[in-house]
Image: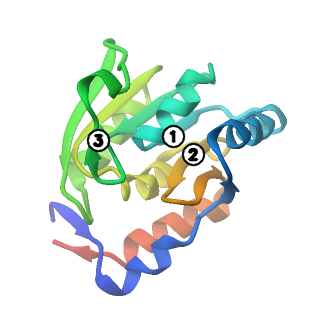
């Protein structure tokens, strides 16, 4: 087995937010994220997606792991718009659209174990949200983008870890 592939019947399920949907423009959304961080005091903050990662980093939120593919809404970002990655703990992995590669899962796991990490994905990072929730400590916060709606904050706990694991188990193993 080299990967998990998203079956068509699971696509609609994954369009619903896994955590708290934070709608609205970025300036108001970031206020809510900061409130969640202040009340929760997460052990790790993990961002999935270019737009959300840039927003949190630019707002001086101490992000432990950024997972990006240098695309926003499937469009390639220009070099000057790309998120500046920290050089010390940068991981690069291939993860085609609609899949979670086992190698990407392993790289995400390794990146979570190191401070100030960036995982740059050639392909698509969206489904790695499930892996991040499954791998993150129970008191972590995972933030990802919800296209055309805002962002989603997932307070990682036993129930969210089980939900992510269940969704991955529903994927086709290849």
Residue 129's disc number: none
Residue 143's disc number: 2
Residue 63 x, y percent position in the rendering: 55, 27
Residue 57 x, y percent position in the rendering: 54, 24
Which quadrant: the N terminus? bottom left
Q: Which badge, 1 or 3, is on the more N-terminal residue?
A: 1
Q: Is residue 138 left or right of residue 172?
A: right
* CA distance separating discs 1 and 2: 7 Å
Q: Answer yes or no: do the residues labelled 1 and 2 have beta carbons within 8 Å?
A: yes
Q: Is mark 3 on a helix, strand or loop?
A: loop
Q: Which badge, 1 or 2, is on the more N-terminal residue?
A: 1
Q: Residues within 10 Å of mark 1 (few under 14, many from 20)?
A: many
Q: Answer yes or no: do the residues labelled 1 and 3 have beta carbons within 8 Å?
A: no
Which of the 4 quarters of the picture holds residue 119?
top left
**At x 46% / y 31%, what residue is drawn?**
65
In the picture of the structure, the residue carrying the numbered disc 3 is 69
**At x 29% / y 80%, what residue is drawn?**
7
Q: Is mark 1 on a helix, strand or loop?
A: helix
Where 50 sits versus 103, above or below? Answer: above
Which quadrant: the C terminus? bottom left
Q: Residues within 10 Å of mark 2 (few under 14, many from 20)?
A: many
Q: How crowded is mark 3: few (under 14 residues within 10 Å), some or many (20 or more)?
A: many
In the picture of the structure, the residue carrying the numbered disc 1 is 52
Where 62 sits versus 56, above or below? Answer: above
Q: In this view, does 130 lie to the left or right of 101?
A: right
| Relative depth, front residue between 41 and 36 | 36
């Amino acid at each position: 087995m080299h990967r998990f592939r998203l079956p068509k019947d699971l696509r609609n399920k994954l369009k619903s937010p896994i955590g708290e949907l934070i709608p609205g423009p970025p300036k108001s959304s970031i206020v809510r994220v900061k409130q969640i961080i202040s009340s929760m005091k997460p052990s790790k903050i993990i961002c999935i997606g270019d737009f959300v990662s840039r927003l949190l980093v630019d707002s001086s939120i101490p992000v432990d792991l950024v997972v990006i593919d240098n695309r926003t809404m499937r469009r390639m970002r220009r070099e000057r718009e790309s998120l500046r990655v920290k050089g010390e703990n940068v991981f690069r992995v291939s993860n085609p659209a609609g899949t979670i590669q086992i190698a990407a899962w392993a790289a995400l796991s390794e990146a979570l174990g190191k401070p100030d990490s960036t995982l740059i994905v050639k392909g698509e990072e969206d489904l790695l949200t499930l892996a991040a929730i499954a791998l993150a400590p129970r008191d972590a916060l995972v933030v990802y983008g919800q296209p055309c709606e805002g962002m989603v904050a997932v307070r990682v706990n036993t129930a969210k870890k089980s939900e992510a694991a269940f969704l991955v188990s529903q994927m086709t193993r290849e």
